[in-house]
Image: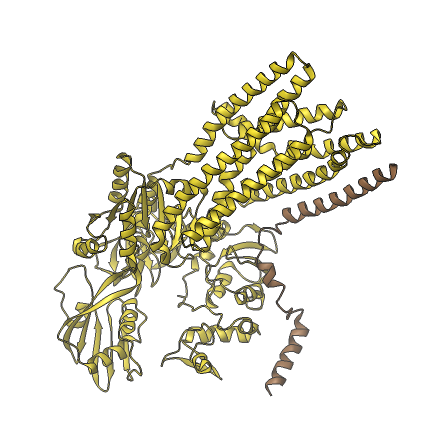
Chain colours: A yellow, B brown
């Protein structure tokens, strides 16, 4: 059974092969594109690609011959490459299609395909390939074209040419942690003899040797690894505020000064072991908290989506021009599957514009000559000519980004911790002074001892660790559920949400399916067979939806198939003419203009009627809405469409929802603003570029995607479409997280209290500190990790 | 007791050696990608140079016959 199943799958990409498949030897391919890739690989002796994984290939789209002609322009090439000398050029491409070990193998052996490539190296997690090539043997354009030919088309967008800051800071932090860990371990080892002999080491020379060695080892920890705490608390104090770094810095400084004094004055071994341990754990906490999803970009704006260059044409000559250099009244040419980068009017050709990235609407819209096409639309069909109306920075959508929203990122807990820190510093100093004053009458030495011991033990290390570990762990758990949270502040903001705003198209509705109904006389089975035979030949999205809709077996043989791009398709089955397409193509005249997506059908030149395509809602929405209403969230839906769907939406949300129709992107943004002015904390759920303004304005913006490799507008959370129905759980989880953190605050203050009771009595020995500090830290970290994991299980996250 | 001082000095030197190799590993970017190398190591080294790959081609065609 399995064997026969496999037999019908394309050897290259694993898609099911239908009647129009092609074969080569004993291998079956679903299309000529896949066969072509196989032939290229076989020619270059690269067939191991197919041995590593079954059907590893990526379906190639048709590459238009001069799509990458802009890569011949030196000014553009220079912005893409990272390094160049006489015989080497270095470049890094983002390739979203990298998905398995075969991909790595093929891309790293890419010099077999293009002899000019010297070396290529894949970073699988980031879906990047780093290529070194010889410019005398090949060119950037040739490499990109041959990558695209084997199915690994690099994503080259406007933001690829603005170079990004590499991850220097991350490496720096790992080095700091490494140094702190190294010194901490060695100091601990050198302190053990002292502890085990309870301070009475036989040989005083040996004791001094150990002490000075710990002092030397402590220097890099306190002056290099911990410098972050001193710098940040200095910055905070300069702005006349306090942060958690201030009491930490005071504690660390107290530990260092007192321990150095003890060692130099030969009065004791000091607290270097617990001090360096503290710094080590706190650095790990910060690293854990700043965890990011490498493969995802939360900052994407139109630049990560718009092309680098577009073909302009003047006096009959076509020339690629960087998009940013386009001027009003330039004429541009856009081909099938290319993006319109600026607002422009159509001069020539049949435009069928797919605005799916902009509005989430997956069905293409027909545009007539003279009408305006907004930037962000993608042409499907034949070549069109356009006249630029606005420069890129002025266009309809890019203006959304000029309205700069700065989200306040000081979160509730940071505020709480900062507030606690302020009192913490004051109370600690107060207790220290009182304790010192008390002992002053008895013994001056003991007074100083108590004063420094209070400062040492009051270092709020556990307090500083509770939020990072809780949130870091939660972000990892959610990441496994395909809910990607940008940073820990977002989780805090989520816990405060009381209003939820949904976009409709693409968010509440499915992207790749549609409800299809036929308007006209009922079709006979024979007629359905005929239509199926025709539409299965076309790759147009509407044809694909129709052939999915029929799901028939053994299609009839079609002859004389013709496709008029942007218009329709026609063909013959046993001398019966079948036509499917736009109204003007099928009936010859154009009457209706009602924004509905329709496909007209004519059999033997008699119009039978038309299919209407309506987007379907995602399943489970009703359940989600019930849960959200139950938890007393204020719900509303904003949509750019008319009010045709009012009834459906009201049924799903059982009338407990505010509906706004015909919203422009600006109106969406403004309605979020006005909700916020009523002191509401707004969560916006959207998917397209037209929601981008609203997503940025909202307290938390969630963007929905069917495939995380796809474009998502700038947002705080990216979630897989299948997880939308768990939205209420996500919010509940973030609220539970707040409880966990409050509990860990209480526990950490308890530890501080115990420590202080030793400190004020002047009995804090290095041994007690060395036991108490790691225990408090580790028990707290364990508490936060276990509690957040248990809560996630209780909510049904794995 | 002086022998323990020598021992500790030697052990610290060894440890510092490891610390330096760790720093070198971080700085040369070996921690930037912790997935791809695990896959890469499993690939057979098929294309050492042109002559060996030509041999392989012959073997391959012989097998087909």
- Is A152 in front, or is A28? A28
Q: Is residue A92 left or right of residue A615?
A: right
Picture quadrant of residue A230: top right
Count the numbered circles shown.
0
- Residue toward you, A540 or A409: A409
Note whether A699 is above or below A625 in the view shown: above
Place of residue A220 in the rendered image (x, y in percent of width and height, measured from the top left): 68, 34
Residue A369 image point, x, y percent: 21, 58
- Residue at figure coordinates x 55%, y 68% from the top left: A113
Residue closest to the eye, B37 or A242: A242
Q: Is residue B24 visible?
A: yes
Which residue occupies 24% across, 48% down? A638
Question: In the visual, does A573 lie left or right of A716?
Answer: left
Give the quarter of the figure containing the N terminus of chain A: bottom left
Seen as rendered, the residue at the extreme right is B2
Q: Is A342 above or below relative to A239?
A: below
Please indicate, yes or no, whether residue A163 appears anywhere in the rendered image: no
- Residue A759 coordinates in the image, percent (x, y): 62, 25
User: In the image, residue A564 lies at what x, y percent?
Assistant: 26, 71
Kindly indicate the quadrant of the structure image that contains residue A651: bottom left
Q: Quadrant of the C terminus of chain A?
A: bottom left
Left or right side of A489 for B23: right
């Amino acid at each position: 059974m399995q064997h026969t199943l496999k037999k019908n799958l394309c050897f290259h990409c694993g898609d099911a092969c239908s009647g129009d498949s092609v074969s080569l030897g004993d291998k079956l391919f679903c299309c000529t594109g896949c066969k072509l890739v196989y032939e290229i690989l076989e020619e270059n002796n690269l067939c191991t690609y197919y041995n590593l994984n079954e059907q590893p290939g990526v379906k190639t789209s048709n590459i238009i011959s001069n799509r990458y002609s802009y890569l011949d322009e030196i000014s553009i090439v220079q912005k893409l490459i990272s390094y160049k000398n006489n015989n080497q050029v270095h470049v890094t491409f983002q390739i979203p299609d990298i998905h398995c070990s075969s991909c790595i193998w093929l891309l790293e052996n890419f010099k077999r395909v293009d002899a000019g490539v010297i070396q290529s190296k894949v970073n699988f997690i980031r879906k990047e390939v780093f290529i070194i090539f010889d410019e005398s043997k090949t060119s950037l354009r040739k490499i990109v074209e041959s990558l695209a030919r084997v199915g690994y088309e690099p994503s080259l967008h406007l933001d690829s040419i603005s170079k990004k800051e590499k991850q220097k800071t991350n490496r720096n932090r790992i080095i700091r942690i490494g140094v702190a860990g190294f010194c901490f371990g060695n100091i601990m080892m050198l302190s053990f003899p002292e502890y085990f002999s309870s301070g009475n080491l036989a040989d005083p020379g040996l004791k001094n040797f150990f002490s000075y060695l710990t002092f030397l080892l402590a220097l890099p920890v306190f002056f290099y690894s911990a410098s972050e705490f001193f710098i940040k608390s200095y910055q905070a104090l300069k702005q006349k505020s306090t942060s958690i770094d201030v009491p930490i810095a005071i504690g660390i400084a107290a530990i260092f000064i007192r321990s150095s004094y003890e060692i130099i004055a030969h009065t004791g071994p000091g607290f270097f072991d617990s001090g360096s341990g503290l710094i080590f754990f706190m650095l790990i906490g910060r690293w854990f908290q700043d965890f990011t999803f490498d493969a995802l970009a939360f900052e994407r704006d139109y630049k990560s989506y718009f092309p680098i260059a577009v073909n302009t044409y003047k006096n009959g000559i076509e020339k690629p021009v960087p998009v940013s250099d386009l001027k009003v009244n330039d004429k541009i040419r856009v081909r099938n599957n290319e993006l319109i980068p600026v607002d422009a009017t159509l001069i020539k050709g049949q435009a069928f514009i797919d605005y799916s990235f902009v509005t989430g609407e997956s069905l293409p819209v027909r545009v007539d000559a003279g009408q305006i096409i907004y930037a962000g639309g993608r042409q499907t069909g034949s070549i069109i000519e356009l006249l630029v109306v606005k420069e890129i920075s002025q266009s309809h959508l890019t203006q959304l980004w000029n309205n700069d929203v700065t989200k306040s990122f000081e979160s509730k807990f940071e505020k709480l911790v900062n507030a606690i820190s302020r009192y913490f510093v004051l109370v600690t100093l107060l207790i220290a002074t009182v304790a010192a004053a008390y002992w002053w009458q008895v013994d001056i030495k003991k007074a100083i001892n108590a004063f420094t011991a209070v400062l040492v033990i009051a270092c709020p290390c556990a307090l500083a660790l509770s939020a990072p570990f809780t949130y870091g762990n939660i972000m990892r758990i959610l990441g496994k559920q395909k809910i990607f949270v940008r940073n820990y502040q977002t989780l805090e903001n989520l816990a405060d949400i009381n209003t939820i705003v949904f976009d409709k198209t693409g968010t509440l509705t499915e992207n790749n399916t549609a409800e299809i109904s036929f308007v006209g006389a009922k079709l006979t089975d024979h007629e359905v067979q005929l239509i199926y035979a025709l539409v299965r030949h076309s790759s147009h999205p509407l044809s694909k939806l129709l052939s999915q809709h029929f799901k028939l077996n053994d299609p009839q043989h079609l002859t004389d198939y013709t496709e008029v791009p942007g218009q329709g398709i026609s063909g013959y089955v046993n001398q019966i003419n079948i036509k499917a397409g736009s109204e003007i193509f099928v009936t010859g005249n154009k009457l209706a203009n009602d924004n509905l997506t329709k496909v007209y059908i004519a059999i033997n030149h008699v119009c039978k009627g038309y299919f209407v395509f309506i987007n379907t809602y995602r399943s489970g929405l009703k359940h989600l809405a019930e849960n959200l209403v139950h938890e007393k969230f204020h719900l509303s839906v904003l949509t750019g469409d008319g009010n045709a769907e009012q009834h459906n939406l009201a049924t799903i949300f059982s009338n407990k929802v505010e509906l706004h129709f015909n919203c422009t992107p600006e109106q969406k943004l403004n309605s979020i603003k006005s909700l916020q002015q009523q002191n509401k904390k707004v969560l916006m759920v959207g998917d397209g570029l037209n929601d981008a303004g609203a997503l940025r304005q909202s307290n938390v913006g969630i963007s929905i995607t069917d495939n995380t490799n796809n474009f998502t507008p700038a947002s705080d959370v990216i979630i897989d479409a299948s997880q939308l129905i768990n939205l209420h759980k996500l919010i509940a989880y973030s609220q539970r997280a707040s409880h966990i953190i409050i509990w860990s605050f209480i526990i950490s203050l308890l530890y501080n209290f115990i420590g202080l009771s030793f400190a004020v009595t002047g009995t804090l020995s290095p041994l007690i500190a060395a036991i108490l500090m790691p225990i408090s830290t580790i028990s707290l970290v364990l508490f936060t990790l276990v509690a957040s994991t248990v809560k996630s299980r209780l909510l049904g996250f794995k | 007791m002086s022998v323990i001082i020598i021992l500790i000095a030697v052990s610290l030197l060894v440890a510092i050696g490891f610390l330096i190799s760790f720093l070198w590993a971080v700085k040369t970017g070996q921690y930037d990608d912790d997935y791809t190398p695990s896959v890469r190591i499993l690939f057979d080294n098929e294309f050492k140079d042109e002559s060996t790959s030509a041999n392989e081609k012959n073997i391959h065609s012989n097998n087909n016959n």
